[in-house]
Structures are given as C-alpha cells and as structure tokens.
Image: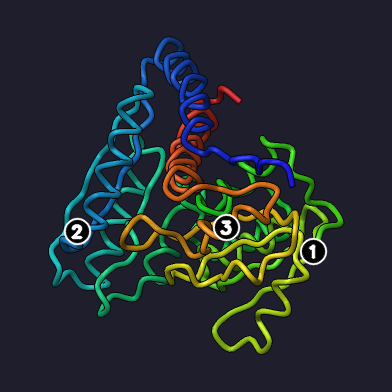
Amino acid sequence: MNTPLILDGKTLAANIEKDLKVRVQRIKDITNETPVLATIIVGNDPASVTYVKMKGNACTRVGMKSLKIEMPEETSTEELIEKIRELNRDKNVHGILLQHPVPGHIDEMACFNEIDLLKDVDGVNTNTFGRMTMQLDSFKCATPYSIMTILKHYNIQIEGKDVVVIGRSPILGKPVAMMLLNENATVTICHSKTKDLEDIVKRADIVVAAVGKPKFVKAEWIKEGCVLVDAGYNQGNVGDIDLENAIEKCSAYTPVPGGVGPMTINCLISQTVESAERKLGLI
C-alpha cells in the first residue's frame, strides 16, 4: 500500500489566511471599515477560553478585529439573548459566535436561533441549517464546512462514495452529513444506538468520526484505502479514530492535531470576511 496522503489542515489554513489578509485590507482600503467577529463566552470553561483565544489570534493574523464578550456563569437565557440582539443591531459587527457549550441552565438552541442569519458565521441557527440543507445561499457550520473544504482541496472524490458519519450533533454530525449528501455521496449516519457499527464502518469509503470519544473507531473496522476524517479532539492529543494503527490501511487521513481543528477556525474567519464584504456591497 502506498503512503497515505496527509490532509494537512494546518498548512491549508495558513495558505487561506494569506488570501484573507488581502481581502481584509481591500475592505479597509475601499470602505475604511474593519471586519469584526464578536465572540460571546459564558463562564470560564478552560477549553472554551483557549478556543476563544485561538479565534482571536486568527482574527489578528488577517487584520480583523475580535470583540470578546465575557459573561458570568450565572447568566440567564434571557440575558444572553438580549446580548445577542444587541450585537445583531451593532452595524460594526459582521459575525457573531456563541462559544459552545454554554452552562447547562441556558437554552443554547434558543440563543443560537437569535443570531441574525447575516451574521451567523458559525452556522448554528436552525434556519441557517435548513437553508444549507436545501442548497440555498447561507453560511455553514464551521467544522462541517472545514471538513468539506479539506476534502475538496485535496481532491478526495465524494460523489458516489459510501460515507459513514459517526455522530449526530446539530453542529457537526447532522450538517456534515447533509453537506456530503449534497455532493452526491451515499451517507450513513451512525450514533451510540447504532447496531452492528463495526460492520457498517467496514463498508465505508470515507469515515467522518465526530463522537467525542478517544480512539473510538478501531483500526480493524477500517476498509483498505478508506479516507479517514477525524473531527475529534480528546485529552492526550488524540482524536476519535485510532489513527496510530489505522494509518497503514487508509489512503488519506486528517491528523490530530493539525487537521480539522485549524480549518474550523479558518472557516469561521472566512465567513466573517464574507459577511463584511456582503454588508459593504463588495461582492
């Protein structure tokens, strides 16, 4: 078997940032405005704090502004919704991100659904999901969009392929399945209640793992020549696939870290730049 292709999201993201930097400068030159991504973080979950910092750093690299709104753990659903509405009204804000997850007492979906569709650069509003599914103009969920961007950049054939998506979350498993279906793949969505999961995975030409469990997908489940997309990130810098043992069987794979993660942030930033361009009439 040939050496598998590494689907290097980190390098791809860095290359796309070069183009984004040019687009941001064009916006500044023509309109004297700067694209702004507003990020809301509720509480002080360490992982969320880290992710928000990484997103802020990405904004800085391309010349955008990052507006961080920190709200206390005890924030109510109503208070969070009012903050989102305030950002919807702010003409200087082009993208709104509500960092997931929020504290358990908050109705996260109700908050997601308050985000203006024109500023929903993380693709979390259910109306955004519906428009994406029906192939209408919309932003897209950042992680699924990053997966599709990686597959297309590396010329991984999707049309006609059997794809197994393991995970059914509303911001990853479900939207990536719809995106793959829209590209004419035959998609099977699996989850914790799926029977005979191993046998289903063994038939897959492409596996997308998004279950949040370290090394959940075993090497012996993988068909020779399969493409492995690991959207998981767990303690110890490991994903949801046992890549260490599965690499020798696959034809291509996303590394963990350095695969889907960097491109997720990149897609978020890209859609914020696009939002600014649309608002300012540049596209």
Q: Residues within 10 Å of mark 3 (few under 14, many from 20)?
A: many
Q: Does 250 appear above or below 212?
A: above
Q: Does 163 appear above or below 153?
A: below
Q: Secondary structure at mark 1?
A: strand
* Residue carrying label 1: 162
Q: CA distance from mark 1 to mark 3?
A: 26 Å
Image side of residue 136 versus residue 30, left or right: right
Q: Secondary structure at mark 2?
A: helix
Labelled disc at residue 48: none
Badge nearest the viewer, 3 or 2: 2
Q: Position of residue 176 (x, y in %)?
A: 62, 59
Q: Amino acid at mark 3?
A: Thr
Q: Tell which of 101 and 225 is nearer to you.
A: 225
* Residue carrying label 2: 46
Residue at figure coordinates x 49%, y 33% from the top left: 13
Labelled disc at residue 128: 3
Q: CA distance from mark 3 to mark 2?
A: 29 Å
Mark 1 vs mark 3: which is more N-terminal?
Answer: 3
Q: Amino acid at mark 1?
A: Asp
Q: Position of residue 120 (x, y in %)?
A: 47, 50
Marks 3 and 1: in contact by CB < 8 Å?
no
Q: Position of residue 96 (x, y in %)?
A: 37, 48
Q: Tell which of 66 and 250 is nearer to you.
A: 250
Q: CA distance from mark 2 to mark 1?
A: 37 Å
Image side of residue 194 versus residue 264, left or right: right
